Amino acid sequence: MTSSDWQSVRRLGKLLEPHRSSVCLALALMGFSSAGLLGLPVLVRGMLEGAAREQPPSAWQVGSVALILSALAVCAYVSAVLLNVVARQVCAQLRSDYAERWLRSSMSAHRRVPAGEYAERLNTSLADVDWFIRGSLANALALFVLMSGGIVMLFWISWRLALVIVLVGPLVVAALRGIERNGRAWLRKGRGEAEKMAGVLQSMVLGLDVIKSFNAEDEAMRRFGTRQSALLETQKKESLVTSLVDPLLIFAGAATFLLVVFFAGRLVAAGSLGLPQFITFLVYLMFVLPNLRNLGIQIARWRHVKTALDFLDDSAHMPPETDAGNCTLRVSSGQIEFRDLVYRHAGRETGLEGVNCTIQPGEHVGIVGESGSGKSTLLSLLLRFYDPCGGAVLVDGQDIRECTNSSVREAIAYVPQETLLFDGTIRDNLRLAQPSAADDEIREACIAAQVWSFIESLPAGLDTETGDRGLRLSSGQRQRLAIARALLKKAPVLLLDEATSALDPKTERLFASALHQEVSGRTMLIVAHRLAAVADLPRIIFIDDGVVAAEGTHRELLARCREYRALAGADA
Ligand SMILES: Nc1ncnc2c1ncn2[C@@H]1O[C@H](COP(=O)(O)OP(=O)(O)O)[C@@H](O)[C@H]1O
Ligand SMILES: [Mg+2]
């Protein structure tokens, strides 16, 4: 056992700690059952010695062996059930811990971790932990009892014959360790490749329309094939190493058996070993030799569970979101101020370079700028997805960094640029904003978002399944549902990030003015790079080069600002 083995034992111990009474009982039953099995050959030896004296075994002898066997089987059954339940509970707990950790992680960490690879790794790790607790924990104990007890009994019956095992044993152990060390390294590499493969598969599933539109099935298949070959290559190398375990153990077992028979023949001929003794010796040898193979399997499983526990521990360090604020944001009027706001994404040299502007309570403001100018980033800072590198965001005069994340987000309803609906019904999707919303409220929000007539036209209405990521709806319908979801929240501040981009400019303009009426009295920021969505708003903020380059009405900006005119020109 190396220090990394002990570390894994400690990690496993921590996972099993809450279930210690079940685990202890299961192991005790399994230990008892294995110890009972060890005792059986002694009883059988009695029968053999009787047979040697030409006395057939009595019904009592056979009956008691049968009774002991049944009791041992019941113990093994109860032990297996207990460990199965514990394994499932440990994995359920781990799964919820990781789901929770994912939900609480910071947005920047979240955007760095490839989701498909992470999910694949989590699933295999959980499967390995489950498998180990169910299959290996009791098995390892039974192996230990049977093999060590068997060896003791072998020495007890004939120490001279047993010495043969002592000669072969250390050689086998040394070889197994070498295999285990190499095998684990290849296993890790194989896991890495399997995760990349899962990532490729996931993008293939998500981007099927793109692939088809470019007639890129062959290219996608080629990329898939490259990953697949890399995976197979690593798995092949792993197999070359780990497959050595079985033949090695079979060879060692057979060699030991031959040596034992060779020496036993001489001892029996010399009269220093009786035949019943020899047969009992062989029975105990059967506890030890075939189990060598089982030992190999358990070693392989240990290798897997160690890798799994390493991963689970690494991901436990996924940075959580900072939530240092300890005040609750109290929104009285909904004024928003961006004060000297500076933000650059990690590894980027440009970003927001000092944004200054104030949005008055109840004001509806358009935020425009070229794509990539930082509009979505500005909204992300208001939502505290990221913390500014300089300056501050204030809501009703309170620096949001000093407030809890949940109170900031409570005050804001947000429609993200990339509309995502979750798998489920339309009602489930809308209720994410307000789980207790009644159907009347949902209807009201949907009417305001101009999506109610569409919902009514569906045979199942609000109970219509939206399909994975809402793909059974058009993008315009998805966007309107996302707006309805935000309206349902009835928050004092509403943020729309290119939320009507799927509509044609004329409908978009009409939609924007209807929305303007609908949310009068509440602060609303409408981000757009197409001007139809904001042209009728009383104030537009134009962002260029990471600063507020100009502000005013659409007409004023057209008259005053050349870059804005360029944007409008591109739009026309
Ligand atoms: N998670 C991210 N990591 C690194 N850079 C990012 C990230 N998100 C956005 N950016 C970069 O920040 C800049 C502003 O992006 P964004 O705010 O999305 O622009 P807009 O919404 O105006 O189109 C872009 O240059 C973009 O490449
Ligand atoms: Mg954007």
Image: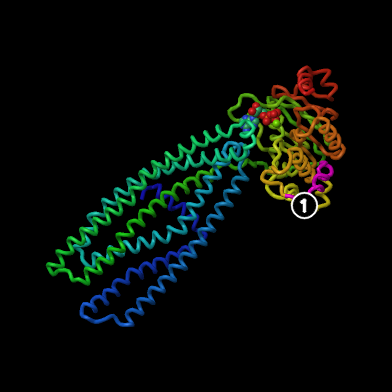
Q: Picture coordinates of residue 146 (x, y %)? A: 34, 64
Ligand 1 found in image quarter: top right
Residue 141 position by quadrant: bottom left
Instruction: Provide the residue designation for mark 1.
Output: 460
User: Is residue 189 part of the magenta span, yes or no?
Assistant: no
Kindly tell me whether mark 1's CB lies below 8 Å from ligand 2: no
Instruction: Name the side, left or right, on which 169 lies relative to 348.
Output: left
For the question of whether residue 21 can be seen, the reply is no
- Chief secondary structure of the magenta span? helix
Residue 406 position by quadrant: top right
> Element under label 1?
loop
The residue shown at (83%, 35%) is 511
For the question of whether residue 154 can be seen, the reply is yes
Magenta span covers which residues? 446-464
The residue shown at (35%, 61%) is 144
Instruction: Give the number of callouts.
Output: 1
The disc labelled 1 sits on which kind of residue? Ala
Q: Picture coordinates of residue 440 (x, y %)? A: 83, 51
User: Is residue 449 part of the magenta span, yes or no?
Assistant: yes
Q: In this view, does 164 lie above or below 221?
A: below
The residue shown at (46%, 37%) is 229
